Image: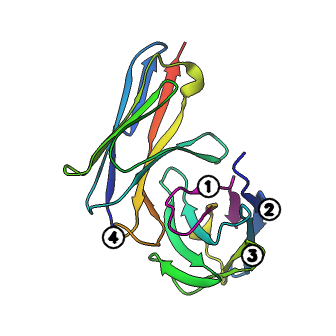
Amino acid sequence: ETGVTQSPTHLIKTRGQQVTLRCSSQSGHNTVSWYQQALGQGPQFIFQYYREEENGRGNFPPRFSGLQFPNYSSELNVNALELDDSALYLCASSWEGRQEAFFGQGTRLTVV
Amino acid sequence: KNEVEQSPQNLTAQEGEFITINCSYSVGISALHWLQQHPGGGIVSLFMLSSGKKKHGRLIATINIQEKHSSLHITASHPRDSAVYICAAPYSGGGADGLTFGKGTHLIIQP
């Protein structure tokens, strides 16, 4: 049990739609990172939020955006869904200055 | 961006064998992560290490910062060790950013 909860666990959306995935971090963890894991691949870094501001970004287009809230929850929003967005989306939380990360179970997104 | 390479990609062994998984990275880092992922997706952090060696039960992780290389060893392997093992390093080598992951080693331990 990592204390990081993601919802929903599974989701099916249609190409062109928008989706919001949610992550509830451990209390006190002010840093959250989001990752995309395509089938058979390692996770890819999407972006990181620190104290409610985007703090770093991987090679993902602007239609991937996020929010972090004061209550240690965060969201990943994806607009104009494409078939290739089908993947497992993972969030990981940590406390500033400490690189140990706690992962959620992930949200499996299928775009049809 | 840090490049993380793992080997082997797939490994099948018999119960009781000593297992070694290797990881190399391209940019100097302050710490490296070893993670375990079971079918269904959940990731568990096994180790975070910045130097030397760490041991937890039958798992041992070592890192050589100068050579940019780390290994994960499993002693007396058991079928319940079957999982994907992933090493991960800071995306840009350090600082407050995310992780770059290797593609993982799919380990199967046969009874």
Foreground disc of the pair 3, 1: 1
Residue highlighted by disc 1: A102
Query: What's the amino acid at mark 2?
Result: Pro
Instruction: Residue at 56% x, 57% y: name it.
Output: A101
Residue highlighted by disc 2: A8
For marks 1 and 2, the one nearer the N-term is 2
Quadrant where the N terminus of chain A lies?
top right
Tell me, yes or no, whether the highlighted magenta stretch contains residue A41: no
Residue highlighted by disc 4: B1
Q: Position of residue A103 (x, y in %)?
A: 63, 55
Quadrant of the rendered structure where residue B62 is?
top left
Q: Is residue A79 left or right of residue A39?
A: right
Foreground disc of the pair 1, 2: 1
Q: Is residue B9 above or below residue A73?
A: above
Mark 3 secondary-structure assignment: strand
Quadrant where the C terminus of chain A lies?
bottom right
Alpha-carbon distance for marks 3 and 4? 27 Å
Alpha-carbon distance for marks 1 and 2? 18 Å
Foreground residue among B39 and B80: B80
Query: What's the amino acid at mark 3?
Result: Thr
Tally the marks.
Answer: 4
Instruction: Residue at 69% x, 52% y: name it.
Output: A105
Q: Is residue B17 above or below residue B102?
A: above
Q: Looking at the picture, do discs 4 and 2 lie on one chain?
A: no
Q: Position of residue A48 (x, y in %)?
A: 55, 74
In the rendered structure, the residue with mark 4 lies on which chain? Answer: B
In the rendered structure, the residue with mark 3 lies on which chain? Answer: A
Residue highlighted by disc 3: A20
Quadrant of the rendered structure where residue A63 is?
bottom right
Foreground residue among B110 and B66: B66
